[in-house]
Image (spheres, rainbow, N blue to C red):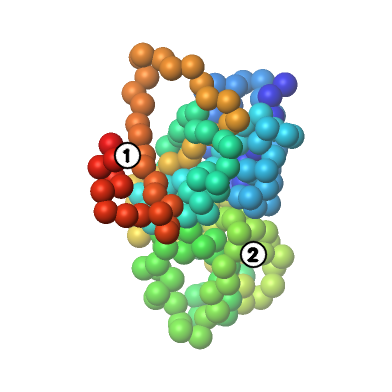
């Protein structure tokens, strides 16, 4: 049985991407969730055959930690998925005025900046490693806590305060890449794409021309 590494905990967009890949390409695979991007990378080729990680958001651009690790790892991209991204705000309070702390994943913060900037300047914004961690924090039930969470999590949990559709852009999507140790055989029927990344400190006049 193939094992797929994805960023956890449960109820993240990474888990949805992994489920999409299983349904499309690996129906017998088992998804394993890891707490950090680095642990997903390190598991590929050891505990898991492939990994699935977000690499680019339509609003926020590239996810730098994933790019950095790809540049310095032995792994290669073998596939990609586009996942619609919708966020909601959940709070342990009767109104927004009752919220004193907001948990939000560092990447999600940039995708919901309009909503977050409308909060009181006294509200503490606390970054998390994943949307799942933000969800876990709000589920602890502490009064005055709020969190930016994936909208699909509302199907499984209820909160005293919910604000839907807090994305800056309602058609937001995130591109996920499937990574593995071995490259896939070239197939003429597929539309391949190429990206170029240049390491900081190695840039020089004429480098891009030489690469091309």
- Disc 2 to disc 1, C-alpha distance: 48 Å
Per the image, the residue denoted by label 2 is 138
Q: Quadrant of the C terminus?
A: top left
Q: Looking at the image, which residue is at 26% across and 48% down?
A: 206
Name the one closer to the observer, 61 or 197: 197
Q: Position of residue 192 (x, y in %)?
A: 36, 26
Asked whether residue 192 is in view, the answer is yes
Q: Position of residue 153 (x, y in %)?
A: 58, 50
Per the image, the residue denoted by label 1 is 211
Position above or below: 54 against 106: above
Crowd band around label 2 with a 10 angstrom C-alpha radius: few (<14), some (14–19), many (20+):
many
Position above or below: 48 against 138: above
Q: Which secondary structure, mark 1?
A: helix
Picture quadrant where residue 59 is located: bottom left
Name the one closer to the observer, 15 or 71: 71
Crowd band around label 1 with a 10 angstrom C-alpha radius: few (<14), some (14–19), many (20+):
few
Position above or below: 81 against 164: above
Disc marking residue 163: none
Q: Which secondary structure, mark 2?
A: helix
């Amino acid at each position: 049985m193939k094992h797929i590494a994805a960023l956890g905990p449960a109820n993240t967009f990474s888990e949805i991407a992994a489920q999409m890949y299983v349904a499309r390409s690996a129906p017998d695979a088992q998804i394993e969730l890891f707490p950090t991007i680095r642990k997903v990378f390190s598991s590929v080729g050891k505990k898991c055959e492939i990994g699935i990680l977000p690499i680019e958001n339509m609003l926020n651009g590239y996810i730098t930690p994933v790019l950095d690790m790809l540049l310095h790892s032995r792994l290669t991209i073998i596939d990609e998925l586009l996942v619609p991204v919708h966020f909601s705000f959940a709070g342990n309070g009767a109104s927004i005025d009752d919220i004193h702390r907001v948990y939000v994943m560092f990447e999600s913060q940039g995708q919901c900046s309009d909503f977050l900037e409308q909060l009181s300047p006294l509200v503490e914004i606390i970054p998390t490693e994943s949307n799942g961690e933000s969800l876990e924090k709000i589920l602890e039930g502490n009064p005055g806590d709020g969190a930016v969470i994936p909208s699909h999590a509302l199907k499984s949990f209820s909160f005293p305060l919910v604000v839907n559709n807090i994305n800056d852009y309602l058609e937001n999507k995130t591109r996920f890449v499937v990574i593995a140790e071995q490259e896939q055989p070239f197939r003429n029927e597929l539309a391949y794409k190429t990206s170029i990344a240049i390491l900081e400190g190695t840039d020089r006049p004429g480098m891009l021309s030489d690469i091309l």
